[in-house]
Image (tube, helix red, strand yellow):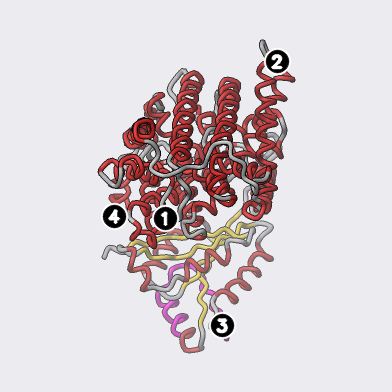
Amino acid sequence: MFEKVKRLVIGRPMKSAELEGEKLSKLKALAILSSDALSSVAYGTEQILLVLIAAGFMALWYSLPIAVAVLALLVILISSYRQTIFAYPSGGGAYIVAKDNLGKAPSLLAGGSLLVDYILTVAVSSSAGTDAITSAFPSLHEYRVTIALIMIVFLTILNLRGVTESASILAVPIYAFVVAIFVLIVCGIFKYITQGAPVAHAEFGSAVSNVSLFLLLKAFCSGCSALTGVEAVSNAIPNFRDPAPKNAARTLMMMGLILGAMFSGITLLAYWFGVAPETKSTVVSQIAEATFGRGFMYYIIQAVTAVILFLAANTAYSAFPLLAFMLAKDKFMPHMFMVRGDRLGFSNGILFLSVLSAVLVIAFHGNTEALIPLYAVGVFIPFTLSQAGMMVRWVRLKPRGWVVKLFINTVGMLVTLFITLIFIFTKFHQVWMAFIFLPFVVYLFYKIRTHYDNTADQLRIDLTTDKPITKGNTVIIPISGITRVVLNTVSYAKTLSNNVVAVYIGFDDESIAKMEQKWEEWDPGIRLIVLKSRYRSIMRPLYKFIQTVEWKKAAEDHVTILIPQFITKHWWENVLHNQTSIMMRAFFIRNKEVIITTVPFHLDK
């Protein structure tokens, strides 16, 4: 039944040879890897205005120079990551760059930050998409957490079905969003030129007494949230068709141009139309209403905005599993993240991402504004480390034209470091959790690596000296009665050893006498050991008996416990029976001198 549902939900299993067919073209890659960056247009300008409005409506004109600064940073980042793509065509982004040039600790900080960032991407995107829906339909506001969780489940299923299939489905709404936003920008500009603004806006250049440098820096940092997702293309180069680096670089350039144009247009319209941030209506919603009124086009804009905000999470679904794979390959994450699922995707990474992001949505009650500062910090730490790593690379290798490349990455490193520090100082009350969580994540990486190293040391053998040791076998069969299950187990035990004993634990003299009489009558050819338990415990007397056998036999024999177990035809029937065999396995599995084996007997009905 489970297998049928699984096939229905995620589709048929795919052969390993079909992996090449899962590679992405530039257009599909732009849709699936740029959705996070493009979707930030829906809240990037809003984040700037939310800070500036604290100084009054007249301070909103500062959004224009701040937007110019954000665009300049976008140009720097696109140029820097374009260099990273050609330098590290295997993907991995900031983690691989830092690992190759800065060392283990910086690379783990970059990798941990990116993993946290991708988790936050899903949480922020689903929350922001819900905000767009509740702006159009305020009656749904109280259901925002439920809506966000439903969308996370939808994206999880979509990505479990495979990269190509998810890209084919997601390309349509993402490109619809791009077209809709450009239509909004063009129509908005035309309306402003022909009819003027519907309401007065702040006069450009007007002096505002309570605007401080601190406030402007804080607004700039908030606006930099529009740049999240820029690094995703460099992380996911292996997902591109050949030539992968060239296709990835072109996709990155297309993404930068589209993002810059949309961000500029929305910010300009927000200023011209005198838009101020509101609790129950987003900035894009207000611009659409001012341009088209509450008509058909308004609801189209809100619909595609909501869809892309949800689908922005898909960037994380593409990049998180790949990064988790690389960390697992280096033994800093569990090996389960290296396993490809039936549809050739890293399904464990997809499921892990979904669960943690859902927990965040529930914990923050779907509050996008509370999540975005953490989200942005998780982005700019890897930005900074990636630029610093590339600087070290150019100085170390000195390839042709390295001075220009070094200059680009130096500027990028200084700017992103400056922004990271501004984030810390201006939004510390919102991002302080990152300074507890990120060190913990890095510590966890080290502990996982230590475990794998210790395990490898203990499992490694010397092929010239370490040879198998031939020993006998003492087999112990715990029984509760004489049944076909016990018959099956005794028959198997006799094929393993001539030294087999059955152990019966009775709670009273009457039950013990009955068992001894039945055993003598049956006479299976093995000895029966009877133990009396005064406290009705099975484990304690059995454990003491096995310890005694170990002490006597460990030198010349292996000690094997064969646990008889019957398997019911239907899974739910297991609930009707004692799970003694499971408890025995759990109890004795930690005894390193004892071998535990279950001998199943399958019931037909």
Residue range highlighted in magenta: 514-536
How many marks the image carries: the answer is 4
Residue at 28 percent across and 55 percent down: it is 1
Residue 533's disc is 3
Mark 3 to mark 2 CA distance (whole Å):
82 Å
Q: Is 366 left or right of 379, judged from the image as shown?
A: left
Mark 4 to mark 1 CA distance (whole Å):
45 Å
Q: Which residue is mark 4?
A: 1
- Most foreground residue, 368 or 185: 185
Mark 3 to mark 4 CA distance (whole Å):
42 Å
Which of the marked residues, 3 or 4, is nearer the chain's N terminus?
4
Residue at 45 percent across and 75 percent down: it is 480
Q: Is 188 left or right of 254, judged from the image as shown?
A: left
Vertical placement of residue 473 versus 13, above or below: below
Query: Mark 4: which secondary structure?
Result: loop
- Most foreground residue, 482 or 2: 2
Which of the marked residues, 4 or 1, is nearer the chain's N terminus?
4
The amino acid marked with disc number 1 is Lys
Q: Which residue is mark 2?
A: 403
